[in-house]
Amino acid sequence: MYRRIPLIVCFIFGAFMLIQFFVPHRVSTEFYEMTLEWAQIIYAFALLVGALMLMKHHAVNATRKSSDDRPFSIIVIAGIATMCIAGLIWGHGEGTVFNWFFQNVQAPMQSTMFSLLAFFVASAAFRGFRARNTQAIFLLIAATIVMLGRVPIGELISPVIPQVADWILNVPSMAARRGIYIGIALGSIATSLRVILGIERTYLGGS
Amino acid sequence: MAEANGKRFHTRHLIFLLMAIAVVLPLIFKPGLPLRVTKEVQDIYDYIEGLPEESVVIISFDHEASSLPEMVPMAEALLRHCFRKNLKVCGMALLAEGTSVGDANLRRIGAEYNKEYGEDYIFWGFRPQHEVAILALGEDITREFKTDYTGRPISGFPIMQGLRNYQNVAAVISVGDGDIPIYWVNYAQARYGVNIIPAITAVMATTMYPFLQSEQIVGLAAGLKGAAEYEKLLNRTGLATRGMDAQSTAHVLIIVLIAIGNIIMFRQRGGKRS
């Protein structure tokens, strides 16, 4: 019974969401909108559970004097607490403490981390991007053309480079991407049906 | 071994230094390399240009703070075009970090064009669970967003009069650094037929090309280049145009480094054979 109830709930809601797509009746639409609201409420609670678990994990780490990660855990807890207090007391709109922290601490730090990618990509490309076999040679040529074709200097070198770059993106790259999308779609349909029909039960936890 | 490690250490730091120079010098000297406007960006510009005044456009800030240097110039260019065309702009975010950025962008660019909050533009705020949020907007916007970002009921704002769902929306612009623009296509375009304009990071560009060919998206503005092209169409030099020169030199440096790396490999192979 403990495992049957979630399976029944999943079947009812899964089958309903599937059928309602083809039934534009007022009652069906109303129930559909209500279901969407429930989904968001459940998601919000899942976020809360996630945040609490994160806090618990780092609280345990922070109290262990022997842990090497202790300073990082303290920073995580302090960061979460600061943003929560700032948001709950002074709000989150323009000109608030919460917004100031976001714009002047979080945004620059994250942008800096992302910007460092340029340096690591350059270093990794030098050490790892080698023409070891035929496939690697093709990849190297395509990457070079696309890299040049997507910036103004490519056009300056030759107007053909951007055209070839566009062709690579529009034909071979897109063909591969489309194949992947079709595979994902078929896989999603199969998995969804398995979940709705109760064949796939890993989301319940356990084996 | 220690010597080898030492050499690697020096090479890596030399590469970092070269990259820093390659990025900083063009930003200082501004060579102003010529920029070609691609069809994908031109299509977006033409579509927005062709919209009647007071048409409603939703702009969703679906990105994190890490991609701000790429996303902000894009959002600014598109917002400037919308406000210049006197379109009604409704802002929202499907990632929490896009919320503050979106609100600040809308207010800043809105002020540039003397636009009134609540009348010419509004910021609804953030909604979690993006698939569900996108679907819910197709049914009833005021049910999904009962209040705006500041907590005031949105039904009281003049901009919301007659705005119920996607049927009253001319286009949705998704400024995203991940795959959320794909969800907009899958759920809002495929189910409700609303026009989608993806403004995405360069690395995500290839994910959108299939939708471009199937005409499920209006056009495609990808990366700093997409933003720079849009700035060119607006005749307004901004952050993206200035950044393109730096991106050019950085790309050339990476290509040169790849070439050097391969030359070294072939020389080492030749040495082993002999």
Image (cartoon, rainbow, N blue to C red):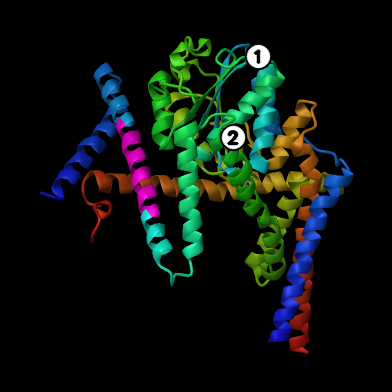
Residue B265: where, in percent of width, then height? Answer: 74, 76
Q: Is residue B151 visible?
A: yes
Q: Secondary structure at mark 2?
A: helix
In the image, residue A46 lies in the stretch drawn in magenta: yes
Q: Which residue is mark 2?
A: B101
* Residue nearest the viewer, comparing A91 with B170: A91
Marks 1 and 2, how far apart at CA: 22 Å
**Side of B70 where B102 appears, left or right:** left
Three-letter code, disc 2: Val
Identify the residue shown where x is 29% and y is 33%: A18
Using a 10 Å C-alpha cutoff, classify the residue at mark 2 as few (fewer than 14 neighbours), some (14 to 19) or many (20 or more).
many
Q: Quadrant of residue B191?
A: top left
Which chain does the numbered disc 1 sit on? Answer: B
Three-letter code, disc 1: Asn
Q: Is residue A141 above or below residue B165?
A: below
**Quadrant housing the C terminus of chain A:** bottom left
Q: Which residue is mark 1?
A: B86
Viewer-nearest of discs 1 and 2: 2
Q: Is residue A187 visible?
A: no
Residue A204: where, in percent of width, then height? Answer: 24, 52
User: Which residues are drawn in magenta?
Assistant: A38-55
Residue A180: where, in percent of width, then height? Answer: 49, 50
Query: Main SS type for the magenta part?
Result: helix
